[in-house]
Image (tube, rainbow, N blue to C red):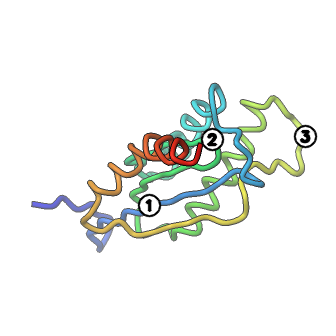
């Protein structure tokens, strides 16, 4: 049987596949920065009670499978994750202390509901790197 979460007066199972990119789609998410961004996003999700089911950072984009409680909208959640993570990335990973203009992520994002097809979406996120490397070999 399918397990549902519950809050006051609601039983829910809201999962979303989200993709967002660094500003100008720069290929910056590798090495120490890639690991650090993962830790920061996981900590921010824990802070709001959002479950990070699956996540994978490519050099120029991030895939996340999130379980977002219905008390938060998707746009609020993504805004929170991108805004707070940008500040923490600059302060903790890039060692920049200026107060204004701490941009890291591009303005938009892509989102899709997962529904009951969660296993397929999580597998796609896990295998994204293999799929990208196979495609790049075709065009070499």
Spatial separation of the CA atoms under disc 2 and disc 1: 18 Å
Residue at left offset 58%, top offset 60%: 78
Of residue 67 and residue 8, the one placed in the foreground of this image is 67
**Residue 117 sits above or below residue 136 on the image:** below
Of residue 44 and residue 31, the one placed in the foreground of this image is 31
Task: Report x, y in % for residue 71.
Answer: 45, 69
Question: Circle 2 — which element?
Answer: loop
**Residue 38 sits above or below residue 61 on the image:** above
Task: Report x, y in % for residue 17.
Answer: 44, 60
Callout 2 crowding tier (Cα within 10 Å): few <14, some 14–19, many ≥20: some
Spatial separation of the CA atoms under disc 1 and disc 3: 33 Å
The disc label shown at residue 98, or none: 3
Task: Give the mark nearer the N terminus: 2 vs 1.
Answer: 1
- Please identify the quarter of the rendering in which residue 126 is found: top left
Of residue 18 and residue 82, the one placed in the foreground of this image is 18
Spatial separation of the CA atoms under disc 3 and disc 2: 25 Å
Residue at left offset 23%, top offset 62%: 4
Looking at the image, residue 119 sits to the left or right of residue 140; the answer is left
Residue under label 1: 17
Q: Are the residues tagged 3 and 2 within 8 Å (C-beta)? A: no
Residue under label 2: 59
Looking at this rendering, what residue extends furthest in the left direction?
1
Task: Give the mark nearer the N terminus: 3 vs 2.
Answer: 2
Task: Report x, y in % for residue 103.
Answer: 80, 51
Residue at left offset 55%, top offset 45%: 136
Question: Circle 1 — which element?
Answer: strand
Task: Report x, y in % for residue 110.
Answer: 56, 66
Looking at the image, residue 96 sits to the left or right of residue 6; the answer is right
Q: Which of the two discs, 2 and 1, sits closer to the camera?
A: 2
């Amino acid at each position: 049987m399918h397990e549902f979460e519950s809050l006051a007066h609601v039983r829910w199972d809201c999962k979303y596949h989200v993709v967002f990119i660094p500003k100008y789609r720069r290929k910056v998410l590798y090495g120490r920065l890639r690991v650090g961004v993962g830790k920061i996003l996981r900590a921010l999700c824990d802070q709001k009670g959002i479950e990070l089911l699956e996540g994978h950072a490519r050099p120029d984009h991030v895939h996340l499978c999130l379980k977002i409680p219905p008390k938060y909208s998707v746009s609020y959640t993504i805004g929170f994750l991108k805004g707070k993570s940008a500040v923490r990335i600059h302060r903790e990973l890039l060692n920049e202390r200026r107060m204004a203009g701490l941009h890291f992520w591009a303005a938009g994002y892509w989102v899709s509901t997962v529904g009951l097809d969660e296993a397929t979406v999580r597998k796609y996120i896990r295998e994204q790197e293999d799929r990208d490397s196979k495609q790049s070999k075709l065009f070499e």
